[in-house]
Image: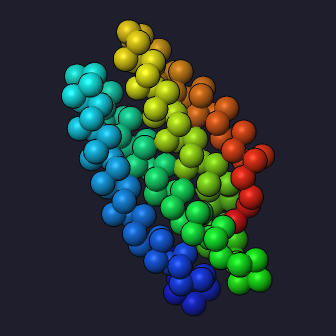
């Protein structure tokens, strides 16, 4: 994000979200690998949780900026036109539900499918409930 167009707290959150997303991805990978034992599944879930974290942190910082100073995240040329907060929370929720499903004994494909469906539902719910930033 460019320095001049967005509030400094959003720019700082964007920078820190990269580090936090990496930490979340590594932590989730290690935890799920220990819990489940499947490295491929752990990789998918960790990447999904990390990407969700990366999307949500700048959104959260943007929402905290006072309304007159706020610039929508979708105005950034590389951000995309979707609800960043809802997408971030939905990806983290999808990861958690997929781990739960796999942990309950469902197969790899079923757990990933349940995660995708729950993530889609979570996105729709969060997009209607969360403020746009």
Rendered residue at 40%/69% (across/down): 16
Give x and y (percent) for residue 63.
Answer: 66, 67
131 vs 50, left or right, is right
* Residue 108 in view here: no
Give x and y (percent) for residue 88.
Answer: 55, 49
Rendered residue at 53%/79% (across/down): 9
Rendered residue at 46%/53% (across/down): 53
* Residue 84 in view here: yes
Give x and y (percent) for residue 35.
Answer: 26, 25
Give x and y (percent) for residue 19.
Answer: 33, 63
What colouring does the structure picture have? Answer: rainbow
Quadrant of residue 46 within the rendered picture: top left
Residue lying at the far bottom in this picture: please name it. 4
What is the quadrant of the C terminus in the image? bottom right
Along the viewing direction, whichever of 67 and 48 lies nearer the viewer: 67
Above or below residue 50? Residue 8 is: below
Quadrant of residue 44 within the rendered picture: top left
Quadrant of residue 65 within the rendered picture: bottom right
Above or below residue 29? Residue 51 is: below
57 vs 59, left or right, is left
Along the viewing direction, whichever of 128 and 117 lies nearer the viewer: 128
Above or below residue 107? Residue 26 is: below
Report the label total.
0
């Amino acid at each position: 994000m460019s320095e001049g167009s967005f509030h400094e707290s959003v720019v700082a959150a964007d920078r820190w979200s990269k580090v936090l997303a990496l930490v979340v991805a590594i932590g989730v990978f290690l935890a799920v690998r220990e819990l489940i034992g499947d490295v491929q599944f752990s990789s998918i879930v960790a990447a999904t949780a990390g990407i969700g974290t990366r999307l949500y942190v700048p959104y959260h910082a943007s929402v905290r900026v006072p309304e007159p100073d706020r610039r929508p995240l979708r105005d950034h040329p590389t951000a995309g036109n979707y609800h960043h907060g809802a997408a971030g929370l939905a990806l983290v929720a999808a990861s958690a539900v997929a781990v739960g499903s796999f942990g309950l004994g469902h197969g790899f494909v079923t757990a990933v499918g349940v995660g995708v469906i729950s993530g889609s539902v979570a996105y729709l719910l969060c997009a209607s409930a969360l403020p746009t930033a």
